[in-house]
Amino acid sequence: MSGQDLDVPPILATADLSGIAYKETTPINISEKMLKANRIIAGMDSGVEVDAYRKLRTRVLKKMRDKNGNVLAVTSPAPGAGKTLTAINLAISIAMEVDKTVLLIDADLRQSRINKYFNLPATTKGLSDYLTSNLPLNLLLLNPGIGRLIILPGGKPIRNSSEMLSSPKMKRLVDEVKTRYDSRYVIFDLPPVLVSDDAMGFAPHADATLLIAEDSVTNEDELKRSADLLADANLIGTVLNKSREAIEDYYYYLDPVPIGKRSKNQSRLKENQQLFAKFLSRP
Ligand SMILES: Nc1ncnc2c1ncn2[C@@H]1O[C@H](COP(=O)(O)OP(=O)(O)OP(=O)(O)O)[C@@H](O)[C@H]1O
Ligand SMILES: [Mg+2]
């Protein structure tokens, strides 16, 4: 039984998903309308934006397979670029595939937001509670009933997030979630790289890191500094998010580094991005 104070049926869900038993995850009720209003669209049947996330998924999964890894970190240079929304939509897109299971972890421990995107109470327990107490992980895992997606929210905000994210307990958690189930991907939504040490401290735990840039906002210098700080973080690419470009195929697939060196300005930068995510207008 979950110890969480959630507005959900107080039952244990044992969802047997392709032979993978999610014992004791807590089911949460999620409405499609709410998801759409929050720009969480990757679970929808069709649409140009849905396809965009499918392409992102395909390319990210290929990179992950090449690295023989299953733990992905998502970060950006500055706040607000779209890390959380990209992490959520990407996680859902992967989780909608027949044989893929995804654990989405909110590792922005100063101001976790995944709970907001899923309309969960701010008091919902999560990663910070796990790291600072003896709560077992399974009591904190939520099952929104979207494909094979499981969510670990951020939990109560903590100040020493940087130490927590680079701690041995965090490393053990990554090792545990990595190996606990077959065919499982784990996606960590991190804070921005240039604002605190959190992302840098955590990134070595991940097999791969995706950098989110905001169209017309993130500049070349920020990208370059972030790529330098993430030198040990297996940067697999950059997503140019909120792209308003009316091009048919807005994904480009190029080597991620050195992003800065090859691009002289914002428009050159666009050509050198690996991946684009289209601007999502609200319904
Ligand atoms: N592709 C997109 N199209 C339109 N709006 C977007 C897109 N991606 C994100 N947004 C919007 O931008 C805002 C910031 O997004 P998000 O919370 O994902 O950013 P973040 O990088 O995680 O921010 P923070 O640094 O505060 O954690 C939100 O209002 C979100 O709905
Ligand atoms: Mg965020």
Image (cartoon, rainbow, N blue to C red):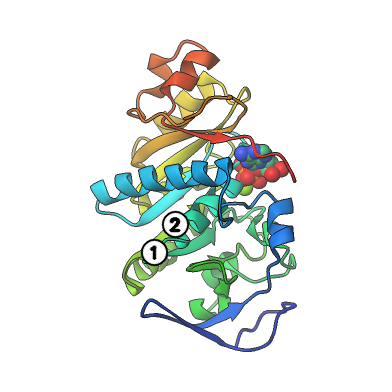
Secondary element at image label 1? loop
Residue displayed at 31% across by 46% down: 62
Q: Residue at x 44, y 49 (%)?
A: 73
Q: Amino acid at mark 2?
A: Ile
Q: List x then y, in percent, for residue 137.
A: 50, 76
Residue 158: tell me if it is visible: no
Can you see residue 137?
yes
Instruction: Judge whether 206 appears above or below 12 on screen.
Output: above
Label ID, residue 100: 1
Report which residue position mark 2 lands on: 94
Residue 154 vs residue 98: left or right?
right
Quadrant location, the N terminus: bottom right
Ligand 1: does it lie within 8 Å of the C-beta at label 2?
A: no
Please give the name of the residue rendered at 63% of the width and 66% of the height, measured from the top-left corner.
155
Residue 11 as seen in the image, left or right of residue 24: right
Query: Do callouts 1 and 2 mark residues in contact (Cβ within 8 Å)?
Result: yes
**Which quarter of the figure has residue 83?**
top right
> Which of these two is toward me, 187 or 229?
187
**Spot occupied by residue 174 in the image (x, y as percentages of width and height):** 39, 63
Which of 17/204 is in front? 17
Return the residue nearer the eye: 225 or 159.
225
Disc 2 residue crowd, few under 14, some 14–19, many 20+, Cα 10 Å: many
Rendered location of residue 273, percent (x, y): 44, 27
